[in-house]
Amino acid sequence: MDRIRIENHGGIGLLWLIGWLFTTGYLGLGFWRAVLALLIWPYDLGLALAAQ
């Protein structure tokens, strides 16, 4: 009988999701811009905070 091994890797994916959700809400991004922000949300957030 084989043993089942469960590994817990870091929460980087969860942190990325939280950052993306925060960015889309904070900046009020539209749908397609929010989809693009999946890849570049730190850039969008940096632009918004630099302009203040």
Image: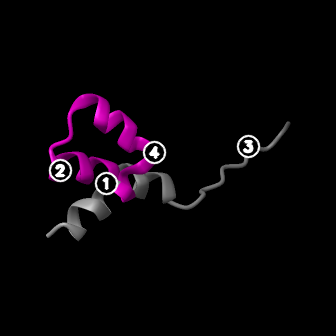
Colour basis:
one colour
Q: Residue at x 25, y 29 (%)?
A: 31
Q: Are marks 1 and 2 in contact (CB under 8 Å)?
A: yes
Secondary structure beneath label 3: loop
Disc 1 and disc 4: Cα gap in Å?
10 Å
Q: Tell me the number on the disc at residue 4.
A: 3
Q: Residue furthest front?
A: 51
Which residue does the numbered mark 1 point to in the structure image?
44
Of mark 1 and mark 2, the one earlier in the sequence is 2
Query: Residue 11's spot in the image, x, y percent?
Result: 49, 59
Query: Residue 26's spot in the image, x, y percent?
Result: 16, 53
Query: Alpha-carbon neighbours of circle 1 within 10 Å: few (<14), some, or many (≥20)?
Result: some
Residue 34 is one of the magenta-drawn residues = yes
Relative height, residue 35 to residue 11 (above, below): above
Of mark 2 and mark 3, the one earlier in the sequence is 3
Highlighted range, magenta:
18-43
Magenta segment, prevailing SS (helix, strand or loop): helix
Q: Residue at x 38, y 58 (%)?
A: 42
Three-letter amino acid code of the residue under disc 1: Asp
Which residue does the numbered mark 2 point to in the structure image?
27
Disc 2 and disc 3: Cα gap in Å?
44 Å
Disc 1 and disc 2: Cα gap in Å?
8 Å
